[in-house]
Image (cartoon, rainbow, N blue to C red):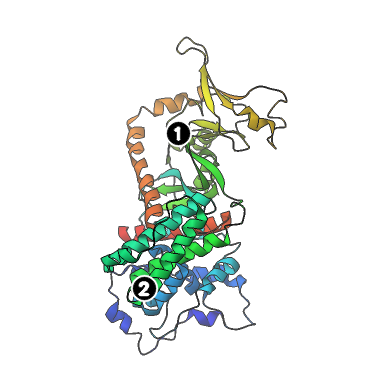
Amino acid sequence: MLLQQQTIAFSEHSSLYDLIIPKNNLLRKINDLIDFSFIYDELLNKYCTNNGRMAESPVRMFKYLLLKTIYTVSDVDVVERSRYDMSFKYFLDMNPEDDVIDPSSLTKFRKLRLKDTDLLNLLINKTVTIAVEKGIIRSRSIIVDATHTLSRSNPFSVIEALRERSRLLRKTVYAFDDEFKERMPQKNTDNELEKELTYCKELEKRIENEPSISSIPAVKEKLNLLKETVEDAQENLTLSKDTDAKTGHKSADSSFFGYKTHFAMTEERIITAAVVTSGEKGDGPELPKLLGVSQENGVDVDTIIGDAAYSGKENLKIANGQNIKMVARLNPSITQGFRKDEDRFDYNKDADRFVCPAGQLAIRKARQGKKNIGENQVDTYYFDVEKCKSCALKEGCYKEGAKTKTYSVSIKSELHQDQMAFQETEYYKEKAKHRYKIEAKNSELKNAHGYNRAVSYGIDNMQMQGAMAIFTVNLKRILKLT
C-alpha cells in the first residue's frame, strides 16, 4: 500500500503546473535535480506494508519538512500554504485538487518515522554525491569550523524568541495597517517569562479579533509562528533544562547554552560532513570524523583549512600520515609539546582557555619561563578550586585539600617545526584566504534557515534540524553552480 503512494495519478488539472510554475522556480529546480526515492528506501522498514490504513507517502512528508526549512514557517503554515500554493503542490507531487495533511502528522512523522535514522549523514551524502557526479567539486580542500545553536530551554532565550516572533508579527501588521499601532497591547519590558507569555497571548487575541488583518496570508504566517513558540514555551516552562544541551564559550567572558555543529565544507561551499555535539565540546577533537566522513562521501582531500583549534598534535599526526597539508595556525597553548591528559582537557579557541573533563573553563592562565634563552616555556591554566572540591569527576584529577588546580602545557616541541615552516609558505597563505567562506555559510544557516536557535529539545532533534538545514543550503548551492 505504501508503494502505491509513490506513483502520482495525474488528474486532468495537472497540466496547470506547466502553465503556472516557471522553469526557474526553486522548487521545480530541486525536483528536477534530485530523485527523492532514497527517502522511501531509507524509511520503508519504519512502516507496516500489509496492515492498517494507507499511510501518507514518506517522501511527501519529508518534503513538507524540507519546505519548512527552506521558507522558515511553522507546521500549520507549511500545510496551509500547500493548500493554495501551486509550487508547493507541485513539489509535493500532489494533484492541484488534492487535499493536504493534518499538521499534527508532521510531529508524528518526526517522532515515529525519522527516529533512530541517521538523517544527517544520509542527506549530506546525497548532496555531495550529486555535486561530485556533476563535477561541481573540483578543489581538494576542506574548510572546517563549528557554529553554535542556542537551546530553547534557557528562560531568557525563550523570552528572546518570543520577542523576535512578536516583533516580526507587529512589523507585518503595520505594513498593511499602520494605524493598528494604536490598538496594540503595551509591550512587556521585564525579563519574566510569564509576563512575556501574557503579552504575546494578548497580542494574538487583538489581531485575531480583526479578520481584515488576521486573514492576510503574510500576517497569518507570522501569527502562527508566534502561537507555535508560545505553546512550546508553555509546555516546557516547568521542565528541567534540555539535558543534552550544555554551556559553551564564545569568549572568555561570553557563554551560550545549547549545541555545536562541527562541519567541513569544500572551497565550492558544499558541506561534506557534520557532527552535532553539546555546546561545551572542543572543535579540534571532531576533525578526524569530519575528515573521514568527507572522504567516505567521495571527496579527495589534500588540504585542511581551519583555525588554531584544529592544529592539535593528534590532528597534525593524522594529516601528516595521509600527506594532507594543515592550513591551521599553530597555537603554543594547544599544540607544542607533550601535554598530560591531552585526551581529557580540550582547548577552547574562543576563550583561549582549556576546559576540564567536567566542562569547567579555566579562570586564568600564566606563562612561566623566559623566552629566547633556551629555557622551555610553560603555560599554566588555573581552575576554580571550589568547583573542583564538589566535582563528580574529581577522583584522580583533584587532590583533596589542594588549594589550587592547574593544568600546564609545554610550548617547545620538535613535532611542529615543519608546520611552523609551512606557515610561512605562499601555498599556506593563499589557502588561508578561503577560510572566510565557512563563516559566510554559518551566517546563511543561521539567518536564512533558522539555525541560530534549536526548534526542539534534545540532541536527536538538533541533528534532524541540522540535517534539513544543511541539505537545503547544499541543494541551493548545487543549483547555483549548475
Element at label 1 = helix
Question: Where in the figure is residue 16, as x and y percent of width and height?
Answer: 31, 83
362 over 213 or under it: above or below? above
Q: Amino acid at mark 1?
A: Ala
Q: How many marks?
A: 2
The residue labelled by disc 1 is 308
414 over 153 or under it: above or below? above
Which of 150/473 is in front?
A: 150
279 over 371 or under it: above or below? below
Mark 2 crowd level (few <14, some 14–19, many ≥20, 10 Å Cα):
some
Q: Which numbered disc flags the more N-terminal residue, 2 or 1?
A: 2
Q: Is residue 474 visible to us here?
A: no
Question: Where in the figure is residue 5, as x and y percent of width and height?
Answer: 51, 81
Q: Amino acid at mark 2?
A: Ser
Mark 1 crowd level (few <14, some 14–19, many ≥20, 10 Å Cα):
many
Element at label 2 = helix
Give the residue drawn at x 42%, y 80%: 94
Question: Where in the figure is residue 302, as x and y percent of width and height?
Answer: 43, 41
Task: Check residue 335 in the rendering and tell me which mark sits there, or answer none.
Answer: none
Give the residue drawn at x 51%, y 29%: 334
The residue labelled by disc 2 is 214
Q: Nearer the viewer, mark 2 or mark 1?
A: 2
Q: Classify residue 161 as left or right of residue 289.
A: left
Q: Classify residue 409 as left or right of residue 66.
A: right
Question: Where in the figure is residue 400, as x and y percent of width and height?
Answer: 73, 26
Cα distance, mark 2 to mark 1? 51 Å
Name the quarter where the N terminus is drawn: bottom right
Q: Is residue 257 visible to us here?
A: yes
